Image (cartoon, rainbow, N blue to C red):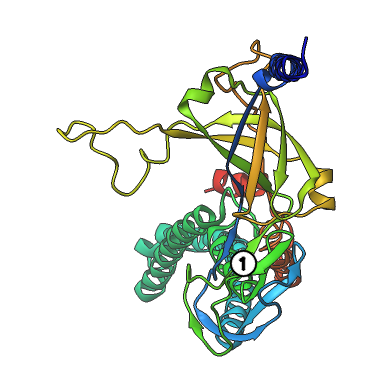
Amino acid sequence: MDKKHKAVLAVLITFMTLLIAAFISWAVFFRYWKSTTDSYVHGNPILITPQISSYITSIHTDDTFYVEEGQIIIKMETIDFETVYERTKAELANAVRQTVLSFESVREIYAELKVEQAILLKAQVDYEDRKAVVATRAVSEEDFIAAESFYQATLSRIEMLKSKLKMAIAYVRGTTIETHPVVLAAKEAFIEASVNLERCVIRSPSNGICTLRTVQVGEAVNPNDPLMTVVPLDQMWVNANFKETQLSKIRIGQRAVMTADMYGYDVVFHGVVEGISGGTGAVFSLLPPQEATGNWIKIVQRLPVRITLDPEELKQHPLRLGLTIQTHVNVGDLDLPQNPLPRSDKPIYLTSVYNIQGDKGKQEAVEIIRQNNTLVEMSEKDLDQMLSEL
């Protein structure tokens, strides 16, 4: 065999070796993976908006600054809200005192009724004594008329007091100072004023990076006006837009590996397929495509596949919204579900910043009621006893 034939044979052997190696690589590795470079980092950007109308007095953070949950980021003018707060505080105290008087008036009217009933006994005796002897002229006509008038007047006063007592009891029955509607209304107004005063201070609802700050000191703002955005760095995932021809073997729960152009191939992120979108991006666009037209052209569609990111890896190598990701999903396990399974009703994301709003006002309201409540306890049994005597 000459050198030329040997060279050709060597080339053929090398080619066949590479071909076999490529086939083995595909059979062992590549056929179990679906890849795309059309992947981007997504997250939960939080738009910061005021809950009240006021003026901005100070800004405590700026674009690219890191903030923690509960940290003050903006303060607003408080004078008007302090005025309302103090007024409703006084109104609550007055409502408690007036309600105490309403309860005390029950005792007062009841006591007056008892006095009038005692007077009635004497007036009745005087009237009946004079009535028995007026015909014999043992008493004068004027004395008899006076006794009769006093007796009738006492009866009228007793009926009036009974009516007043019924109304007074009806006004307070079934309630206490704390649960009386007048006090509750004043209490709610005070708590609302306290909450609005607290809302003059805006706190970050989450840890994250501030961005898109548009608000300025001195600016008048109203509820729902955009002030800035906070991007939580620990609430991120990847939306990998796979072609529809790649989706037949993708299942929820399959493993994925990803690299970010930001870090290059040296940093590998690991994740899991969490869900597959309910429709392509074109379907949810502002102007959905019209397929029933004469000039229809088939275009391969892409469907977003949501992939989680490992929290620890995300801490070590933080990402930002919109960054480009190269995604590879291992589709070897086809026993996993293709449709999502029902989840529990536990919250996925939450914040405690707004939970404390109103707590201070509620505590202060309880103290205001306590300080102004001078009522000696009056039970439902006491009220029933009074009514039974009418």
- The image quadrant that residue 31 belongs to is top right
Q: Quadrant of residue 358?
A: bottom right
Res 117 → quadrant: bottom right
Q: Nearer the viewer, residue 325 or 11?
A: 11
Residue under the point 58% across and 18% down: 249
Instruction: Tell me: residue 320, above or below residue 259.
Output: below
Against 286, residue 247 (above or below) is: above
Q: In the rendering, at what x and y percent does residue 233 appear? A: 72, 55
Instruction: Where is residue 226? Give x, y as percent.
Output: 50, 70
Q: Does residue 337 lie above or below 369 as drawn?
A: above
Q: Secondary structure at mark 1?
A: helix
Residue type pointed to by label 1? Ile
Please indicate, yes or no, whether residue 222 appears anywhere in the rendered image: yes
Q: Nearer the viewer, residue 163 or 274?
A: 274
Q: Residue at x 71, y 18 (%)?
A: 8
Q: Residues within 10 Å of mark 1 (few under 14, many from 20)?
A: many
Residue 18 visible? no
Q: Locate the N terminus and report the quarter of the image it occupies.
A: top right
User: Foreground residue, 198 or 300?
Assistant: 300
Is residue 137 or residue 350 the one in the foreground? 350
Q: How many marks?
A: 1
Question: For the point 52% across and 73% down, which residue is it?
Answer: 52
**Residue at the outermost left position:** 294
Which residue was labeled with disc 1?
191
In this view, 249 is above or below 135? above
Q: Position of residue 338 (x, y in %)?
A: 56, 18
Image coordinates for residue 352, horizontal then vertical, percent: 72, 55
Give me the residue at 72% from left, 43% from top.
259
